[in-house]
Image: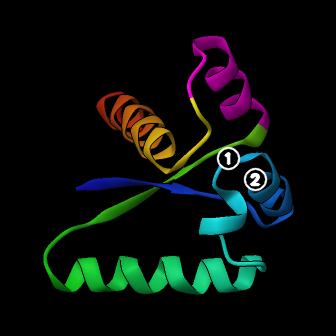
Amino acid sequence: MHFEPWYRREEYALIREIMDDGKDTFPLSFDEWERNAENERASAKLEGTIIIPVIIAPDEFSSFCNKWKIPLNKTTRAEFANSRGAASHSMGM
């Protein structure tokens, strides 16, 4: 099981804007991002890995990063998703 950052359509433009690496790592459209993410999820499943999406809310993530003075980037998003996903999973959510 692997937790991955996931985004809501209505927040995607803001996510792309606030991330330090947003314009470099995120496709322009949510549809393209979603298609890529679902393809990765399907490929992982074929290899025996279950990817569980963890919604990253822009305001919460930005506040978290600012509080701890850490970058809003791919590494931090992955760690944040793993932490949130593991916490939710252990609580049976």
Of circles 1 and 2, which is in front?
1
- Whether label 1 touches label 2, CB < 8 Å: no
Res 21 → quadrant: bottom right
Along the line of sight, the residue nearer the viewer: 68 or 47: 68
Name the residue located 82 percent from the left edge and 54 percent from the top edge.
Answer: 17
Q: Residue at x 63, y 22 (%)?
A: 64
The vertical placement of 7 against 37, above or below, is above
Task: Check the image and report above or below for 81 versus 49.
Answer: above
* Residue 15: image tag: 2
Picture coordinates of residue 7, whole percent (x, y): 66, 59
What residue span does the magenta drawing correspond to? 59-70
The residue shown at (79%, 33%) is 59
The majority secondary structure of the magenta stretch comes to helix
- Quarter occupied by the C terminus: top left
Q: Secondary structure at mark 1?
A: loop
State which quarter of the image contains the N terminus.
Answer: bottom left
Instruction: Measure the alpha-carbon separation of dots 1 and 2.
Output: 10 Å
Query: Mark number for residue 20?
Result: 1
Query: At label 1, which amino acid type do we have?
Result: Asp
Q: Residue at left 78%, top 45%?
A: 18
| Amino acid at the residue labelled 2 | Ile
